[in-house]
Image: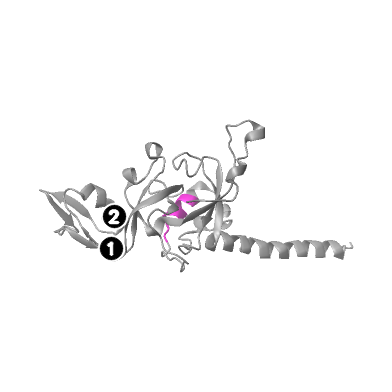
Amino acid sequence: MKIDISIVMKYRKEYYGLAIILPLIIFIRITIGEICTVPSSSMEPTILSGDRVWIDKTTYGSRLPQNWIEIPLINILIILWSHRIVDMKSNWSYFRLPGVGEIRNNDIIVFNSPLDKRELLVKRISEIYHTGDTLVLNFKNFDRLKKVVEYEQKSIFSKNGKVFINGTADSTLRLQQSYYYVLGDNIQNSLDSRTFGYIPESSIVGKMSMILYSIDNNAPLKNRCRLSRTFMQIK
């Protein structure tokens, strides 16, 4: 049997092409940014449902994957749901590459929901506790700051008007990472820190910087594309 060498070379070139393109896509998704579709109205009027936005991962520094599920394309190989659940429970060390800017108050960020890590949320930062800050806890702010203490891997409870950290009556805590109180611009229709409390820096995926284009799925077909929002900077 004769083998057409031209066909072999064709498939070899395609293989080499995939071997270059796939790692490049993974690299871009992890370190530079990715496109995300906004499904809800929680950030209106700044961001509309149907906006296709760019998540910038260079400003704050990209967060490296903490399990296989977080690696683009590779996670497709983990098809069985049972395997996905097991892998999601694994936790590699948290590490973030150096960024070109800082996380600031009023920034619009994308982060893993504290209620379901598989879901990404978009909110605006309204308050920040920085790494190294000392929290002073009391009976009045116990509910608001309890989650922060738990993120710091310490137990906390209140009794007789006192706050106990790791079983000891202690009203102060020095933070090992930064925490953010986030709110939706559409304050009447937003699941945010009023429900799940402060979020840790380790859950932040990136900064929402630009609307690439926008589709209004409720409009007539000819009017669905919101041309005025194409390549619009988010403020």
Q: Where residue 32 appears, x then y in whole percent?
A: 55, 62
Of pointers 1 and 2, the one earlier in the residue sequence: 2
**Quick check: 140 left or right of 195?**
left
Q: Secondary structure at mark 2?
A: helix
**What residue sits 63% from the left and 39% below the top?**
225
Q: Where residue 3 appears, x then y in whole percent?
A: 87, 63
Report the residue marked by disc 1.
Answer: 175
Amino acid type of the residue that numbered disc 2 sits on in the rendered structure: Val
**Quick check: 235 left or right of 11?**
left
**What residue sits 52% from the left and 58% below the top?**
56
Q: Secondary structure at mark 1?
A: loop
Amino acid type of the residue that numbered disc 1 sits on in the rendered structure: Leu
Residue 54 counted in the magenta span? no
Residue 197 in sight in this render: yes
- The range drawn in magenta is 84-91
**What residue sits 86% from the left and 65% below the top?**
5
**What residue sits 28% from the left and 63% below the top?**
175
Q: Which mark is residue 148?
A: 2
